[in-house]
Image (spheres, helix red, strand yellow):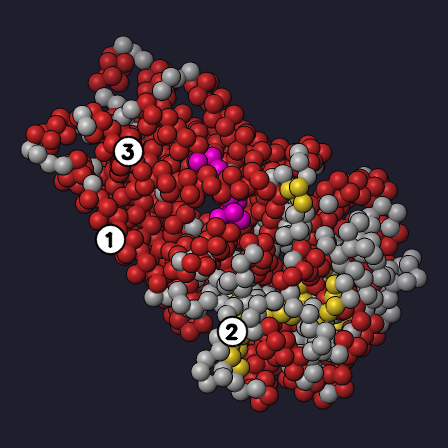
Amino acid sequence: MNLRARNNLIGWSFIVIAVIMICLFYFYPMIQALILSFQSGTGTNLTFVGFGNYQRLFSDTTFLTTLGNTFLFLIIQVPIMILLAIFISVLLNDKNLKLKGFFRTAIFLPAVTSLVAYSVIFKYLFGPEGLVNLFLLKLNFISDPIQWLSDPLWAKVTIIIAITWRWTGYNMIFYLSALQNIDNSIYEAARIDGASSFRQFTNITIPLLKPIILFTSITSTIGTLQLFDEVMNITKGGPGNSTMTMSQYIYNLSFRYTPDFGYAATVSYAIVILIVIFSVLQFKLAGDKK
Amino acid sequence: MNKLKRALIYLFLSVAAFISIAPFLWMIVSSTNRSVDVTQGKLLPGPYLGENLTKVMDNVDLVPALLNSAKISITTTLLSLLIASLAGYGFEVFRSKAKDRVFGILLLSMMIPFAAIMVPLFRMFGSISQWLPFIGIDTITSAILPTVTTAFLIFFFRQSTKMFPKDMLEAGRIDGLSELGIYFRIFVPTMKTSYAAAAIITFMSSWNNYLWPLVVLQSPEKRTIPLLISNLGSSYSPDYGLIMTVILIATLPTAIVFFVMQKHFVAGMTGSVK
Amino acid sequence: MKKMLALLLASMVLLSACSSAATNKTGNESETNGDGKEKITIWAWDPKFNIAALNIAKDAYKAENPNLTVDIIENAQNDIVQKLNTGMSSGTTKGLPNIVLIEDYRAQSFLQAYPDSFFPVTDYIQTSEFADYKLGPTSFEGKNYGVPFDSGVTGLYVRTDYLEQAGYTPADMQDINWDQFIEIGKKVKEATGKDWLTMDPTDLGILRIMIQSAGSWYLKEDGRTANLQDNPVLKEAFETYKKIVDANIARTHSDWSQMVANFNNGSTAAVVSGNWFTPSIMAATDQAGKWAIVPLPKLTNNANSIHASSLGGSSWYVLNVPGKEAAAEFLGKTFGANADMYQKLVADVGAIGSFKPAAEGEGYKAPNEFFGGQHIVSDFAKWTAEIPKVNYGLHTYAIEDTILVVEMQNYLNGKNIDQVLSDAQKQADAQIK
């Protein structure tokens, strides 16, 4: 055996466990789900229906609503969060900033809480007589309490606030780390050339952060398309279907109402296809070969 | 002008920090109050922390749940780091076209929503139960195995390996170390910060994992912390002072892990995003 | 390479060592030990209500059969629903309990989705001894699978002191309809400034109460076809709901605890709910003597509507796993036969069952001082016997959560009622298979 072939073999042995585990716990169940997606019925009484489930998908108003909600969260929440995370990380990257460690720790803190815990807390804060309303009323921003959880529009806002609260600090860490890799002399040079901080931000920081922005927006997109825990625990998808996401619809089809696992599997394939399309799109938009 | 800008920056950061911390403060305050005070929105600390703690100890199986969560999270973290860093290292150091293709396929698994594979996974563990009862349904092992390997972590370690100096590899080979020896004696110690960052992320998500343990762990003595909390809130007459106290205790381990490893965390992330 | 394998093996050993210590016991296997002792496992969800009731049953059964160990496990209701679905659909009964509590609204969906997973209890109880309306949800294809537990019978809880300020007494409310109910609410709000009701826009429990009081439901008799369009009862219930909202006498809550708080801090005067709500009202000890429970209002324009309905009752089911006979025996001898035990249930837990012979006992006749000496249990028992029987079918929550809640909002915002119901029907027909 020559050296190259030997090295190649050693290389495979390094990755073989991971490959087996992922095939076993992700791909194999996904194939099972594919088979399921051609069947329909309640519980264990499944019959083969061909593409029936896929046709049903397009006339199912609940599915279309969840699709719309998920997109809304995606289009509004992901950009807000990423901009906010970049902005904060740029502020924190300032060498002369005092209390840097405190700010960084504080803003990252939401990411360590368990979802079950933070949803309990958010349900309180955003209740009709919760602290948020109390605060806004005291400051005279509003004259009547906002129905944060029971009005269809405000419930969406609440979910967006909740996700942003929890994940901004997490994404910030990625940007902060990347910023520390940027050589400070680039900024020095820009300053000597008389570039404003805004120009420095758009012309130096953003381009240098591009790979990270791509990375975080893909992971955030995946996260949002799979959004489940927050919605499940804070609004249960309500009021009505106004905050229900696709993942939660799958869960409801399988575990909350009379179970139809076949159709649930069909919905999950719809999500997978969407995620693939989106990731490809983001790569294309970023125009990056990497 | 410059001073104003400074002041604005501090103001903005303070508001952001306050918004991030406020719910925690409220949680801490609530753990010192009675249920009635919590539902009526009391904002000042009360004298009931001791009472709440006693109630937790008397009525809630907190210690077993903490132990279960610890067992699961620590094992998951150790195995995850080992498997993912081996793979990330393998993909980068022994790069080949075929491996890159495999890597791409593995990344696809990030896109599978967990709700989609939950039922097939459960069935799989159901049939394993017949002949390997120690990894079947309702075992700690079954709660660990499916979450151990994530494409995200493999990706993370591959990125980190990119900044690992290649000449150190060569030096190791010249010293006559085996490939595995190089990995354990040179790579692992050098990449401490990356491991710290990965450990924090994995530990946190494992500690907070809800859906899979909920499905696969059936008997109450195997309950993890998130399952315990969700159970407490489901009574017709929940005791909120007690619930807040439990949540507070449950959040401590992840907070501690984060505070202890914080410095390495940022440094480790820096390595991976270069 | 060898080292890596060794490492892997070592970690696997470590892993199984960590867990195997605790793996020997599983939920369902009723283990028969050498001394003839048997063990069964039961799942329920509320430590102060159904679990407390189970503990009483367990003690009562000790006298009958000291050899049976009963293991009671608390799980959240949603978790139980999910665990049952996962377990039964995977075909592995491992980890499932012997007896499980299921809400009546959901019962048919389980019985029909997993017919082989349940064990009929027809031979262990006298079905005629239970309130008639409980037998629909608990049986399937002529066999009875559930032992009825709490009745879920509804009543109208009111603050008598607020009523008095508006010039009413509980006696005025013994035979009222929903229109009168709203009028009284307006007067009370005028006189006291307190809200009459508190409502959660995402929970249409009050709608369910109204329609069952007239013997109607979201689904037709077959339990599968939606019964929304041209359903006069549902239409009137919708209209009544809107009248309540438009009268501006209800505040909103979005969480159970907020609802309870609205009563305990005195800001709400009345609630229509199931009898299991009694302990929450009684939690505010400073309000003792200020509450009364009067019969449910009936629909104003529907001759079939009566003063009795049900909300959220549940029943016990035996799973088809080893130990099922012992489990069915346990239920049959306790919840299915022991009228004395029901007296204790009422006195200690406040749980009112649907076992008719129990109503004759002393516990049912006792007055309750918190409610001004009213004989609340015998009142509830009387109403229980009158509750109309309906088929909750397979899709109660699916229709309510995903369709009716949305359409109710549209209706409140001005959409025509017939349009609302026909749109809801269309959606339901498309969605429910």
What's under tag 2, amino acid-wise?
Answer: Ser
Using the rendered view, name the quadrant where residue A219 is placed: top left
The local crowd at label 2, few if under 14, some if 14 to 19, many if 20 or more residues have their Cα within 10 Å, is: many
State the residue lying farthest toward the front. A1
Which residue position holds label 1? C10
Are the residues flagged by discs 3 and 1 from a single subunit? no
A115 is within the stretch colored magenta: no
Q: Residue at image x 61%, y 46%?
A: A261
Query: Is label 1 in a helix, a strand or a loop?
Result: helix
Range shown magenta: B109-121
Query: Circle 3 marks a residue in which chain?
Result: A
Parent chain of label 2:
C
- Residue position for label 3: A12
Q: Residue at x 19, y 28 (%)?
A: A1
Seen from the viewer's position, the closer of residues B161 and C125 is C125
Task: Find the distance from the CA under tag 2 to the CA under tag 3.
Answer: 47 Å
Q: Main secondary structure of the magenta part?
A: helix
Indicate the quadrant containing the C terminus of chain B: top left, top right, bottom left or bottom right: top left
Depicted C14 relative to depicted C407: above or below: below
Element carrying mark 3:
helix
C161 vs C52, left or right, is right
Q: Position of residue C89 (x, y in %)?
A: 58, 54
**Residue under the point 28% across and 56% down:** C13
Q: Which type of secondary structure does the marked residue at label 2 adopt?
A: loop
Q: Which mark is residue C30?
A: 2
Mark 1 packing: few (<14 Cα in 10 Å), some, or many (20+)? few
Residue C147 in the figure: left or right of residue A17: right
